[in-house]
Amino acid sequence: MPKKPTQPKPKPLRILGLDLSLSPGIAAIEVRNRQPHLIAADSVATSSGDPDAVRSAVVESFVSQFVYAHRPFDVVVREDFTAGRNKRATQTVFSAWTSADRALYPFGYVALDIDDPPKLAPTYVKKTVTEILGKANGKAEKDEVAKAVRKWLRLPDDYPFRKGYDDSDACAVILAYLIRENLIDMEVAA
């Protein structure tokens, strides 16, 4: 009796996620068999004592080095920016976006954000990711988001995210995208 042809395993999907500010977080998650796996996550803190040009250069270099080390990516996502607390906050976020765009472009990447409805608004990311904790919360604190990220990624409860949780926030952006696009199984993390 002839053997049945086997279906090839689906290619893993690798996503880069950005939580952008002048102290950004970045993460790489790979989806294999509808399960998310953390490849790497990091953040960098820039000094408000430095001029914006220096801070922007640090962000660009940081993103570029991370992309170089963990590429290739199938998708690049970032949280949508709705509005800053004030004019200065808005300027710094757009400065970080521009720096990240400059870092991504030479590698051939463009972040999905403005033209990728529905938006990955901060409240959407928090609400979607914290749903696993039994209470979806669009205003969740960073430590609560980190707890949910650990659960989604099957990391130990004491997995050490960096101070400020910007790396965890970048993971949350990716997870929200994966959930929205139905690319991971919801019961995986339960």
Image: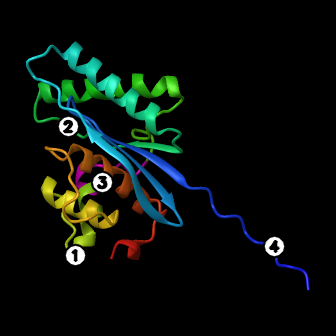
Q: The residue tagged with tag 4: helix, strand or loop? A: loop
The residue under the point 23% across, 30% down is: 93
Mark 3 vs mark 2, CA separation in Å: 20 Å
Q: Position of residue 12 (x, y in %)?
A: 56, 55
Determine which residue is flagged by label 3.
Answer: 172
Name the quadrant containing residue 143.
Answer: bottom left
The residue under the point 15% across, 53% down is: 142
Residues at badges 4 and 1 in contact (C-beta under 8 Å)?
no
Q: Would residue 3 be counted in the magenta stretch?
A: no
2 vs 1, front mark:
1
Determine which residue is flagged by label 1.
Answer: 134
Task: Check disc 2: other Cα within 10 Å, few if <14, some if 14-19, many if 20+.
Answer: few
Mark 1 vs mark 3, CA separation in Å: 16 Å
Mark 3: which amino acid? Ala
Determine which residue is flagged by label 2.
Answer: 83
Q: The residue tagged with tag 2: helix, strand or loop? A: loop
Q: Main secondary structure of the magenta part?
A: loop
Mark 4: which amino acid? Pro
* Screen quadrant of the N terminus: bottom right
From the viewer's perspective, is residue 174 above or below residue 44?
below
Kindly tell me whether residue 124 is visible in this rendering: yes
4 vs 1, front mark:
4
Is 135 displayed left or right of 152 in the figure?
Answer: left
Determine which residue is flagged by label 4.
Answer: 5
3 vs 2, front mark:
3
Mark 2 vs mark 4, CA separation in Å: 53 Å
